[in-house]
Amino acid sequence: MAERPDPMGRLASWLADGRMPSDLSPAEHELWTAYATGAMVDLTGRGERTVRASVLDRLLLGGARPLSGHVPAVRLRGAQIIGRLDLSGGRVECELRLERCELVAGPSFANAQTRQLRFQECTMPGFDGGGLRCDGYLSLSGSVITGTVRLPRAQLLGGFRMNGTTIAVPGGRALFSGGLIVEVGFFARKADITGEVRLVGARMNGGMFMEGATLRNPGQIALDAQNIVVTDALECSRGFSCEGKINMRGARVTGTLSFSRAVLRGPTPSDVLVHLGHTQIDELILWTDEKIGGPVTLAYSRIRVLRDSKDSWPDEVWIHDLLYDSLLGDREMRPEDRLDWVNRDRRFHLQPYEQLADWYRRSGRDDLARESQLAKLRKRRSSLGPAWRAGGYLLDWAVGYGYRPWRAALWSAVLLAVGTAVFSLVPPHVLRQPQDVPEFHAFAYTLDLLMPIPLFGQRDHWNPVGWTQWLAYGYIVAGWILVTALIAGATRVLRPN
């Protein structure tokens, strides 16, 4: 009886003694031979460019013996790789470098341990690196990927490079990861990504650099980086463009989070476009090239230094319970612009005004601190009932809620001048016998009407006539209001907080 062929047995024999398989094509034969020295095999422009993924699998898993004195590696350029490159769960002890290759199926390195992986200017329908541990760096720079790049729980100890990479998964997840750890740095400069970039819970220990990158996921989340931890810098700047929502809730950035010269556009003005709530950031830069296209929330965040431009902020900003150590606006930022920034939070909260006043006070600008407190009371007035609102308008008109005490003196001077003129032209009648009545003096009489306690005895002896009687009653009421306002003003001065 004829013996059945045993392909698995032959493969085990090849792996044991490092012999070259007999069924290799010329291109595969050249690649197998070059592995021992780590030489690059360039198939660009050749008639036969096809290489089976199974051959790459064998080489990467130690199917060929290295040459003494050389570092083995799989380096291939310009090939068409058929089949699925599958190293799932394997241990790769050499570098893989593919340049300008076309991969028919998306490679899988799920739960594998590898050295350096480099896919430069390749095309592929996805990449699976879930649970991957890469001792070198993973590079997809310049590649065109039409499926999801999966990196949940991956550990990239030499960094992650996606410079110039194009990923297109419209309406889906372009980059999917959870718990990703990247040492050295995440680089996606000038990348073009359509679909969601999900980096929830990632740790970028060497920074994250996306200068000039373009993210597109209209109407949905374009960048989901909740609870991300970034050491060094998170650069979404210098030409960075995002069409869709950015969610960085709970992020921790030990360094700078920069949106300098960025363009952030959202689907509708009512949706939160940039979510930076509950974050801790050393320095936040918001100097965008154009007005941010939707609401921004910084609620419950702790930012040491905030650098911004008045032309960057959208019409609605949520900043309640935001704490900051310093505000550094651009050269065109004026104190009234900063108050306008606080007023853009449509839901009234005391804390943003108190925080701004505290910062002005620490900066030695007590005048601007008082302006912040006044703006707080004016904003609060709109939430009160009709009676309290009317009283608020009156107190604001009189002395600016006590922060404009000089107004009381001004109104008193105006009332004195008018009263003196009126009562000089239409003097009041005497109330008692002439011998008991002090001589009438229009100025003193007007001043007596304005004072809650008469000082000159004019009001007790002279009674206004005709229509001036109603004027006198109005002066008495105005006097009480002005005195109350002056007391409030003195309280504000003595107790500014």
Image (tube, rainbow, N blue to C red):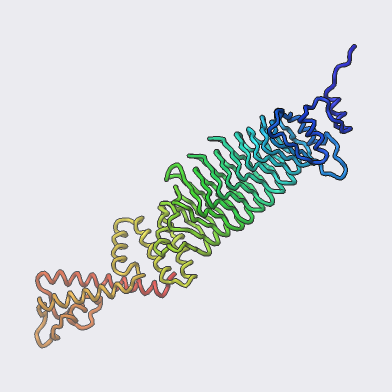
In the orientation shown, which residue stands out farthest toward the bottom?
435
- Residue 269 x/y as whole percent: 42, 45
Q: Residue at x 89, y 32 (%)?
A: 17
- Residue 66 x/y as whole percent: 85, 39
- Residue 89 x/y as whole percent: 76, 36
The quarter holding residue 376 reads bottom left
Q: Residue at x 45, y 54 (%)?
A: 312
Q: Is residue 92 above or below residue 322?
A: above
Asked whether, in this view, residue 62 is left or right of residue 448, the answer is right
- Residue 357 x/y as whole percent: 45, 66
Task: Out of 277 and 273, give the one closest to the viewer.
Answer: 273
The quarter holding residue 13 reads top right
Task: Out of 167 and 27, give the one closest to the viewer.
Answer: 27
Asked whether, in this view, residue 412 is left or right of residue 190, the answer is left
In the orientation shown, which residue stands out farthest toward the top?
1
Asked whether, in this view, residue 387 is left or right of residue 342, the answer is left
Q: Quadrant of the N terminus?
A: top right
Q: Residue at x 73, y 38 (%)?
A: 111
